[in-house]
Amino acid sequence: MSVLIVGASVAGIRTAQALRAAGNTADITILGEEAHHPYDKPPLSKEMLLPGGDGNPVPLLSAEEIERLGLDLRLGVRATGLDPAGRTVRTAGNETIGYDDVVIATGATARSLPGAGELAGVYTLRNAEDAFGLRTALATAKRAVVVGAGFIGAEFASSASAHGVEVTVVEVQEQPLAALLGAEVGATFADLHAANGVALLTGTGVAALTGDGRVTGVRLADGRVLPADVVVVGIGTVPATGWLGGSGLEIDDGVRCDERLRAIGVDHVHAVGDVAKWPHAFYGAGMRIEHWTNANEHAAVVAADLTGTAAPRVTVPYVWSDQYGHRIQIVGRPAAGKPVLLRGGRSTLAAYVDADGVLVGAVAVDDPRALMACRKAILARTPFDAFDAPTRRKETA
């Protein structure tokens, strides 16, 4: 028996580890498009960019662990096609690799801006090469513009400001993360940028990038031009499914899967991580979740399915972000409810309540105990009126 895992990032590597932990003894081959040893993704916008560090990726596992697990890790190999009927994967090197079971773990690719690829100094932040380039650029840059005030943009702004770079963040929403967390909570994160000397321009989009060969600025929709030595684009991602054209898989904002992460309509194909869209057991709806924790949980689900063991309990989504020395944690689905701001300012705590008054999400800053209490209440589908909130005091920083 053989298992082929396409993708050597978190979801792919954790799937291999979970298979071995569950007792699977099949030959496991992992294809990684990048030439780098498998590394963790969250440090790309954090530890790898901060001054004082060595700037190296954080490995997901050591060479010794790869050998001990008996993994055939093939780096610098890009998959270009999947034939479920023939149980083969084609690569950019015209190689055909057979399998008994295949796991799609190709993740997502970053969205960019028109013309970005023609200008040096414009980056997304999705892989190690992006982080290497940005760390080098930050050593001499004077001004950086960040397009998008989501987690990637905010984390880069935090790291860049630590280098003494003048940073401006441009966000089309009226407040950072407003669509996810609401305008009132988003305003507390706007205050966090301001408190750390980062300029935030909201309610405006980007019309174009300026420069000839190298970026010199960002032209806003209102006509203003922001000078820039470095531009980081953090405007979301799309699932990496282009290579699956003609495979017969159902693609709908990711690979459509069942509750065991089996790809719909084909046999012996699973998908995990950012690329997988599945009926989340807690919510009963098709979801594609781009969280580090989700990739780990998917790995355990697939390992259980392939080894015939009991599937792990699916929990609610969780994500964190480190910005300006603060840890921001989000659990559940805040966008599915309305916010109740329990505590504002730099120690923000907010709960989110649906139309039936049930707690569905929460966000906490520097308060893991409060976040854990909210998580337990969300899992129990606790009505907010019965929730023993960590605090109902509305404070200011």
Image (cartoon, grey):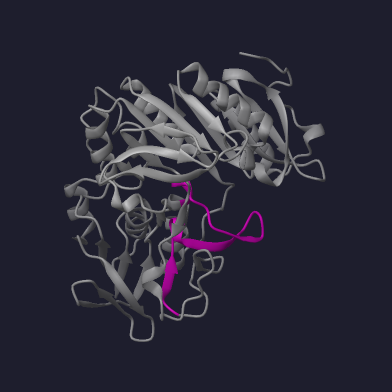
Q: Which of the 4 image quadrants contains residue 354?
A: top right
Q: Is residue 139 left or right of residue 179?
A: left
Magenta residues? 267-294
In percent of width and height, residue 96 lies at 23, 79
289 and 230: which one is in front?
230
Residue positioned most to the front: 223
264 shown above or below 232 = below
In percent of width and height, residue 158 lies at 41, 27
151 shown above or below 370 = below
Verify whether residue 273 appears in magenta.
Answer: yes
Query: In what quadrant of the picture does the N terminus appear?
Result: bottom left
Verify whether residue 275 appears in magenta.
Answer: yes
155 and 68: which one is in front?
155
Q: Which of the 4 image quadrants contains residue 33?
A: bottom left
In percent of width and height, residue 329 lies at 54, 33
68 shown above or below 382 = below
* Residue 253 visible in the snapshot: yes
Q: Is residue 221 left or right of residue 243?
A: right
Q: Is residue 118 left or right of residue 35?
A: right
156 shown above or below 314 = above
Q: Residue at x 72, y 43 (%)?
A: 337
Q: Residue at x 66, y 60 (%)?
A: 284
In percent of width and height, residue 150 lies at 50, 39
* Residue 152 visible in the snapshot: no
